Image: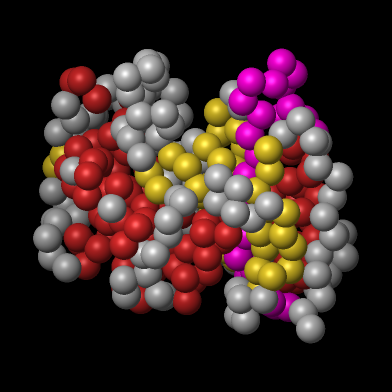
Amino acid sequence: MTPSLRLPRLDPRATWSIRVVDASTGDPLLEHDPDVQCETASIGKIFLLIEVARRIESAVLDPDESVEIPPHLAVADSGILYRMCAQRLGVEDLALLVGAFSDNLATNALIHLCGLDRVRAVAPALGYERTSLHDYIRDHRSPEMPWTPSFGTARELSDVMRRLDAGDVHSAAVSERVLGWLASNADTSMVADSFLLDPLAHVDAEYQGIVLRHKTGTTDFARVDVGHARGAAGSVAYAVAANWKGVRSDLRAPVLDAMRDIGEQIRLRVTGLPREEWKR
């Protein structure tokens, strides 16, 4: 039997959905309400990247095609494109901005290019019933708009990361392209904080030989980290989501403490090394 990880103390005021699996066997290592659906902030952008990669690999999209961003889809906050002078970039560069900085404006440009209905259909087509990218990213979400841009469960999100690593999302080429964009994710503040990687330079194997491919999502009531981590001792796919919508307190401190605890256990499992032991 595959040894399990230990569930840390979880703040009961938050809604949690957690699943960590051995990426080679699919055996569960840690679970807590893995089928509970959470608002997942930017996590659904993974399915947008899957659709973009599928179109590039099938020659429907030219990766160098310049994409115009309609003014009504302008959005700020997450990312850097909204602060850049050049506002028309190619498909490949926009996808990289989504993977590296969860760029909201790049996300909206690519959703508009592919079509929202088509992007919404990506997760169901892969067999996921409770997980999807649901809407454009918006500066303000009024009652008549879709309730959230992204939702999902830890069971389904950990599975899509496992399948991406296995080359099992449409094709090996599509999976590899998506993972390549996610490789530059600069947000290592959650589960991945315990991996001690250089946040801006971990495309290749970095601290203790860890290779990380992941996506994070953040709102004022959510922290979500889903990914695949590989080291000399093994590999895992994981999804950890916490929501505290409607709670009067800001729970980011206890939520991040628990996420880092899970991350430390993942680090030990995939490297087999004590935290301070590493020689290049």
Residue at 71% of width from left, 16% of height from top? 248
The quadrant of the rendering that contains the N terminus is bottom right
Say above or below: 38 vs 169. Answer: above
Q: How many marks?
A: 0
Q: Which is nearer the eye, 222 or 55? A: 222
Image-quadrant location for residue 164: bottom left
Q: Which is nearer the eye, 94 or 140? A: 140
Residue 201 appears left or right of 256: left
Residue 88 appears left or right of 154: left
Residue at 76% of width from left, 30% of height from top? 13
Give the residues in magenta. Answer: 230-254
Q: Residue 204 location in percent, x, y? A: 54, 64
Q: Magenta segment: does it hold 247? A: yes
Q: Which is nearer the eye, 129 or 62? A: 129
Residue at 16% of width from left, 26% of height from top? 70
Colour scheme in use: secondary structure
The quadrant of the rendering that contains the C terminus is bottom right
Q: Residue 46 location in percent, x, y? A: 41, 51
Say above or below: 8 vs 256. Answer: below
Q: Residue 116 location in percent, x, y? A: 23, 41
Q: Residue 233 location in percent, x, y? A: 73, 78
Q: Is any part of residue 203 visible from this angle?
A: no
Q: Magenta segment: does it hold 73? A: no
Say above or below: 71 vs 233. Answer: above
Residue at 68% of width from left, 43% of height from top? 16
Image-quadrant location for residue 149: top left
